[in-house]
Structure formats: C-alpha cells, structure tokens
Amino acid sequence: MDGTFTQAWLQTVSGGGFPLLTALTLLPMLFAIFALFIPGELSFAHKAMSLVGSLITGLLGLVVLGQFDRAAVGMQMVDNFAWIPSLGVRWLVGVDGLSLPYVLLTVGLTPLVLVGAWSAIDKRWKEFGIAMLVLETGMLGSLVATDLMTFYVFWEIMLVPMFLIIGIWGGKQRIAATVKFFLYTMFGSLLMLVAILYLYHKGGGTFVLADLAAVQLSDKEQLWLFAAFALAFLIKVPVFPFHTWLPDAHTEAPTPGSVILAGVLLKLGTYGLLRFAIPLFPAAMGKAAPLLAVLAAIGIVFGALMAYVQTDVKRLVAYSSVSHLGFVMLGIAIFNEEALQGAILQGVNHGLSTGALFLLVGFLYERRHTRAIADFGGVAKTMPVYTAFFVFITMSSIALPLTNGFVGEFLIFAGSFKEGVQSSILPPDGGGMAWRTLVLACTGVATLGIVLGAVYMLSMVRRVFFGPITNAANELLKDLTWRERFLVGTISVFVLWIGVAPGGALKLSETTVHAMVQPLRPQIQQVRSKADFQREMRNAAMLRPQPTR
Amino acid sequence: MLHDLVLTTPLLILLFAALFTLVVDAFLPSGDDNRRFWAYFGAAASAASVLASVGLWKFGGSLEMHTTAFAQHLSMSHYSLFFVALTGVCALVTHLASPKYLSEHGSAWGEYYALLNFAAFGMGAMVASESLLTLFVGLEIMSMAIYVMVAIKRTSQASVEAGMKYFIMGSVASAFLLYGMAFLYGLSGGTSYLDISRALSQPGGNTLWLSLAVLLTSAAFLFKVAAVPFHMWTPDAYEGAPTPVTGLMSSAVKAAGFAALLKFLYACLGGPAMNTLHAQVPVVLATIAVITMTVGNLLALSQKSAKRTLAYSSIAHAGYLLLGCVAVVADPNLPGYLQPTGAVPFYLVGYAFASLAGFAALTVVGKGGEERTGEEQLIGMGRNYPFAGAVLALAMISLAGVPPTLGFFGKLQLARDVLGVDGGKYLPHIIILVLNSVVSAYYYLRITVWVYMRPDPKQAPEYIRETSLTWAMGLAAAGILLVGILPQRALVAGQRGVATIRTATAIKALRYEQAKPGPQPVRQAAAQPPAPEAKPAAEN
C-alpha cells in the first residue's frame, strides 16, 4: 500500500518510536470504521463504541502531554511521511505550545460530550457516534498538521459530520441553519485552497509550512494571500461581519453539536490565524492588524448587545461566543507575548465555560423542551444543584477573579495596555502613535464589553433562576442526575484550576509564544510604522547639508 | 497478427462477450431470470477486460512489445489501457446495477447486456484509436449502443423521447466530426495521427482551414462530453434513460469522450505540430470550460429531481474537466514538478466513481416502473435503506469535492496543475472554479438533506433491494473512499498515461526528423529526455 501507513508501521517495528500523533489523529476514525459494521439497532453498542474510542484517544492525549517538553522550541513528536507524493502532500504532524492546549481540549471535551449525548440524542446513534468520531479526527488532524494540504483536508473533513449533526438531530430550523453553516464555511475555505495552491507554486512544489514561510512574496501578493487565509479563519471564528451563520447553527444544533462547535471548532479559526496566516504573511498582518483590532472591538460590544436582547437562552449563549471570541481576536491583533498567551488561554477557557453553558442549557431543555427565558423563573427553588453549577459557570464566563475567564482576559488586557502605553519596539517619540491610540481605544471598548457581559449574563440568570415561580411547569423540575453532575463538575474543576493556578496551563504555551513573537513581531511592526519611517526619512533629507560646488 | 490480438485482448473480450450474448440469448427460454444471467456474464467479461488491461499494463513493458496494433490503427499504450480499464469498471458496475431495475421496468432484454458490452468495446476502440478512422468507428459503435440503451424502456414515453433526442443530436455531432475529419484529411493527406501531426508541422500551412477542422472536430467531442453550448440534450437524455444507463453515460461515455479529445488535440497540436493553434486552443478551452461549469451549476440549482440535478451537474463537471484539458495541452510548458500532469485522467476516475455510486443509489427508487427521483421518493432513504442512503450521500459529498473523498483530490490536482500553467495565467479561471464548487455544494447538499434530514414520510416508499445492485453501490463507494484516502497509485497511473501520449508524440517527432532528408537537426537531442518513459518500468 501507499506511503503513510506502511511507513508508520515500519517506523514502529524498526524501533524508530511509536508515531504517537498519527495514532492519536487516526484512532477515532478507526473506531468509526468499526462502528460502520455494527447494526444500527444496537444503539447501546454505538454509545459504548464511540465513548471507548474517544476515551482511548483521550488517554493518548495524556501520553502526548506527558512526553511534551515545555522548554523546547519548535514542533515536537513529529511524524513525517510521504502521503501523496504526486501531489507533494506530506503527512507532517507535530505539536507545540500553540496546538497542545487545543489538542487536550478536544480529546477532553469529546468523551464528555458523548456522555452528555446519552440523553440529548434519542435516535440514530449509529450515525451520531460515527459523525462524532470522524469529527474528532478532523479536529485533531487540523490541530497537529503542519503541511498545508494535510491541514486543509482535515479542516474540510470537519464540515461533513457537523453538517449531519446539526441537520439530523437539530431543532426546527435545522436544515436552513446547517446548509448556511456548510456553505459559509466552505466558501471561505475554498478561497484559502486557491491561496494555498498559489503559495505551493511560489514555493516550487511543496505544502510544508516551514518551507513556505521562507518564500519571498511581494507586498501585493502577501496582502491577497493573507486576505484569502484570513477570510477562511475569520468566518470560522467568527469575527463580526462574518458571524451570521453562528447564532443559527448554535441554536439549531443539538447540545453535543453546540458544545463541540463552541468548544473546539471556533478555536480552530483563531488557531489557524496564529499557526498559518500570520507566520506566512507577517507584513500583511502588520497592515491588517488595525482592522482586526477594530473588528474585534466591534464584535465584543455587538455580541454583548445582541446577547442582551435575546429571548432564547441558547441564542444568548451563542451571541456571547461572538463577544468572547472578540477578546481572543484582540489579543491576536495586538500580537505581543502577554496578549498572545492570553488569547490562547482564553480560547481554551471559552471552550470550557461556553461548552459547559451549552450542556447546562441542554439539560434544562431536555426537561422542559423550551429555552425561552420567559418560560422560566424561580428555577433555583426546584433545582438548587443545577443553579449552583450554572451560576458558577456564569462567573467564569463573565471573568470573575479565581475563575479561568479572569486569567485569560486579564492577560489580553495587560498585553494591549502595554502595547498602547509603551510599545517595546517602536521609539517612544511619536512613532506609531496612531496605532497606539487605536489599541487604547479598542481596549477601552473591550473593557466596556466586560461590563456588558456581566449585564446580559446576570440578567439572564436572574430571570431564569430567581424570583417567584411563575410557570407551574417549573414546580416539578427534577434536579441534575449524577451523570449530569459528573459532566459539569468535571468541567468546573478545570475552570477553577485554571482560575486559581494558571501557571501550569500558561507554561504549556510560554516557550512557543516567545519563539513565535520574537522573530515575527519586528516584521509586523516594520510595516505598521512604514509611514512614520517615511516621514523620518523626509525630515532627514531636509536636514542633510546641501552639496556645494 | 498474434501480437495484435494479444495487445487488444481487453477489447476483444468485450467484443466477443457482446456477440456471444447476442447470439445465445436468442436460444434461451424467455423469462427475466434467464436475462439476469447475462448481467453476471457481462460483469465477468468487463472484469476480465479490466484484468487484461492491468496485466498488459504490468507486463507489456517486459515483453518489449510495441504498443500499436492493426497497422498502427490502435495503440494500447498506458494511456489507452488506463481508460480501457476505467470504462471497463464503469461497465462492470452498470452490469451489476441493471437486472432488477430492468425487470421492474419490463425491459429485461438480453440485448441490453450485449449493447452494454458493445458500448464498452466502442469506448475502448475510441480511446485506443491512432487514426481518425478507428476513432470514428469506435465513437459510432459506442454511440449507437447507448442510443438504444437510453430508449430501451419501450413503453415509457420519456425514455423513447430521450433516446430519439439523443440520437438526432448525436447524429448531427457525428456529421460535424466527419466534416472536420474531411478537412483534416485534405490538409494532411492521411488519416492517422502520425500523418496529421507530420503534415501540420510543415511551415506555411493554412491556419484557417486547420482552425476550422479542429473546431468542427472538437464540437463533436464537446457534444459527447456535454459541454456548453452542446449540452441541450443532456438533461432530457439523462432523465429519460434507465438510471443505470444514466450512470454509464455520465461516467464511461464522458471518460471516453475526454480521453479521445485529449489524444486528438495532442496529435494535432502537441509535439512536432507546434503550429499557431498551440497558443490559442488552451485559451478557447478555458473560456468554454468556465462558461460550461457556470451554466451547469446555475441550472442545476433550480431542479426538482435528483436525476436531472445530476445531469446538470455532469455539465458542470465537463466544465471542470475542460479546464483540466488546458493543463494537459499545455503540459510541456508546465514547471518540472507538475510534469506530466494527470489532471484529466485522475479527475475522470473520481467523477466516474461518484456518478456511478450516485446513479446506482438512485436506481433503488425505481421500484414498480417508477421513474421519479424527486424529494418525495428520496425522503427517509437514510433510515429505510441506510446503505443506499449512505452511498448516495457519499457520492454527493465526493461530487461536491469535500475531502477525504476522491472528488476532492481530483479537483485539487486539477486546480494545482492548471494554476501552474504559464505562471498562474489561469488564476481567474480557478477562482471561478472554486466559487462554482460552493454553488454546486448547495444542490448536492439538498439531495443529502432529502435523504437524511427531512422528517420521514408516513408511508415509506418501496425500494429495489438486490444483491448485485448492492455490490454495484459497494464497489463504487469503496472506490470513492479507498482511492480517495490513498490516491497515489491512481495518480501515478494517470500521469504515466499522459506521459505515454506525450512520449508517443515525441517519438513521432524523432522518427519524423530522422526520416527527413538532409542534415540531422539539433532537435534529436531535445527528444532524448522522454526516452526512459517510453520503456514502462516494472514498478507499476
């Protein structure tokens, strides 16, 4: 047979080390293939199959964490095989501090989501289990791939299972929502594919990220290629004007779909920007950074305001995602060490807290089959444990100190204030003044977003949980079962852990962020202060003594 | 003579299977079960033909045989073998998909299977042709068989109408082809590709007549592959034809059409015949390609039935493939890492498997003479007949070009190679191609939505369930997935195929130069590099 698998096997038996990341990525797919041959009537077998598959993947994820060297720079545990030599596609996978947090988030959330789905998904478990496992392979593959085409393949593989999950098990408007999701995402991705191919030709026939980053491009080329990459990623995140697919997809998706969508899929947008778009086109990023910062600030406030006026709890949480990811985008646009650390951590935080919120909303929906805020009120009286968990996760979502949200947002703000007040690279005398003012303005607006976050979340909590019971149906609500407590409790532990002792989580990405910012930041800054540079040159020319005969 | 027979084994198997079927069927007692035997017989013949092609591919090199047979009228080069094997697989799947459907529609004739074998033989002759004569004969054998197969449901008005329409339009196309060939003969004084390319490379040729000849001939090919503006017959013929036949039309007929077109263009334009057309033809092709894909996709958006949607989708895919032809025609100008480009052969494999799978899965709704494939018929298929539903969904995903299916890698290679032509000259065309893919995803998804996502109907429709049909679907689906995830072999095979027509042209140029009186020109050295490719290595 062809390349990859034979070579991987050969490498293993010849003592070259177990191809850990390859196994991690393909294991869920393998279980999905097993599941194909189990009849659909045995839904218990499918529940067990998908759970076992994702748990073993989770264990492998822990092994990856154990073998990960936090002090090392560059990709670790690299597997490098020829996959499709005729097309120049290599199976080149590895992890570093940028991808590892998200790999762990993926392998951790998937089993939880599958356990959560035991009650949320009541039909066609065969298809559901297979879709979830394929989705996990897609997510892991996108996170570990460092060959652009391998990345692209996995990036697109994620689309089909998500399309099915929303479309088959979703709510009333599911078909419109899922088609919108698919077409929107595919549109962005395909333009990125053209950009990848263009880059491939420029690089003389390779898709390997490290080789392509060394390709010399003109400013114009950089800008167009960056635009194509950024469009794909910004749609996925989603950043403000491209967000319209998200509320529909989130609201119509079944609970497991929402959790995975919010928990991991959206992060892949910001991850893609950091992994591919910025290192490949730093100069274009320099030009685009002000725009990204402004879009991020708009997204923060817009998402918050939209969330405030929602009448459906799930839609409210969906818009809160737009707002939260605005913070992550702000950190990326600032691109200094503090802000980037914050952005990466905030991505994980959002996955945990919003994932937990979607789970919690799902629990309520399973009991009452409605999500309208107006249908509730006084739920705290009948469901005290549920209320406690919900309030705790809400605190994390609005970034209260001692929860994870605080650490992430604090780091982003620390980074952006530093950038605005004393930029470490630009000369202090006026250079880049416009950029600094912009950063400070965006940071100010983003701070407003935090306040608004508290407003919409807390007012929702008040209306749903407190006050008198107005609706008789809420008198008989049953509190959380042990399975549900276990799910939310597990996530809460991590929320608290990152909030109280963020050192361990931050250490994971510290070296990588440092190694990334160090060479790239000057390239980005150079472009940003070009206008200033030209002004200085003009001044210098005027001061130069005139040649005399 | 023996040499000729050995070389053409894959074709002869099909021919004799067809004749055997035709003669013996007359003596078999009536009854659908006896007709069913011919389906298995034909499938076995197709499989044997495919195996023979593979065997020739593997051992042809070590036997050091020349690849031309029958006085250089046929050439069983890697290029021909590739397409003979591909059309053989298409015929195999069609054989397996047919019997129950035909019984349900009251047209289980033994002749159907004979015609299917004749069609496969015609395709083989067409792609293997080295002269205009064999090309025309092959094309007509294929076409005549397909016309009858389209109209084989004698009692169905739609089927007969479709056959009639296809026949009349196809005859006009054949007339075009003959007219163009007449011009070519007049210009070159010969009918073989060798003569033509030799004559056309003479300086001072008449470009006007040559352009006219290429235009007329290409029009006939564009008709066969359903490119705009010769696409009008497609929706009606595809919809009216029995569903397995539609599968054959969109997979094998299209593959044979493109294979013959490329070989023809290469003979007229490539190699020694570096005439003025060489610069113009790719531009014309690219323009037709862009118009074809856009028209096909936009018209497919508003279709109500899956079969008609796929008919328009096949027009769109013809557009993608025509763009791929640009890369193949421009092959010598490509950067080194792209040569030789297998864009068209590999894409055709992907498209063939996807449309075979799609139409095989649509065959199951043809229970009881029913011939509608709209929303009503497909709703609930994912639950009531999970296998067929999954195959149909997989086919749609592959046609939309989503990884890890074969359709994606086909599109990837095609876009990559076209983008490499003349330093990105066709970038706008590629952007139009990917935007078209987004548009097409909408209607492919719509079919998937019917199959999986609409609430189940109260009364589940009856489906055709049959072992051989299941095998047909399984084979095509396995092709989509296995060749999709590990595409290397098919890619290399396609590249070697294109390499042989390139090498053939180079060798022709060499022979031509050597035969020329006077001092040997320097071009002999230039023709040296392709020489290793002329000897097929044993690794494949």
Image (cartoon, coloured by chain):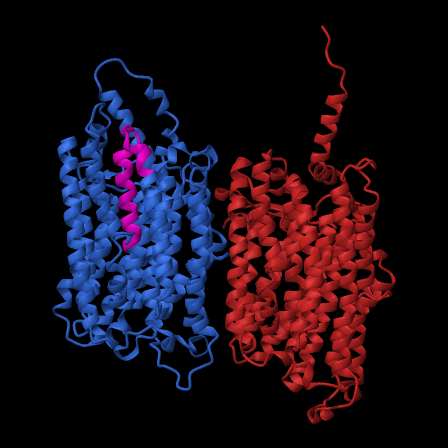
Residue in view at x 60 percent, y 58 percent: A241
For the C terminus of chain A, give its image quadrant. top right
User: Is any atom of residue A60 visible in this view?
Assistant: no
Q: Measuring from the top left, give residue A121's x and y in whole percent.
A: 60, 78
Residue A475 % position (x, y): 73, 93
Instruction: Give the letter of the blue chain.
Output: B
Query: Mainly helix, strand or loop, the magenta region?
Result: helix
Please name whichever residue, B72 or A539, is drawn nearer the observer in this view of the structure: A539
Magenta residues? B253-282
Where is residue B96 drawn, in percent x and y?
31, 66
Please tell me whether residue B50 is drawn above or below residue B502 in the rendered image. Answer: below
Q: Is residue A545 above or below residue A117?
A: above
The residue that appears at 26% across and 25% down in the rendered structure is: B511
| A62 and A544: which is toward the camera | A544
| Residue A80: quarter of image | top right
> Does the magenta segment cover residue B256?
yes
At 57% across and 65% down in the image, what residue appears? A245
Q: State left or right for residue A157 relative to residue A513.
A: left
The answer to if A329 sits in the magenta stretch is: no
Relative to B113, B456 lies left or right: right
Q: Is residue B290 visible?
A: yes
Residue A35 position within the rendered picture, expressed as x and y whole percent measured from the top left: 55, 70
Vertical relation: B32 (above or below) B80: below
Give the red chain's letter: A
Above or below, B534 relative to A265: above
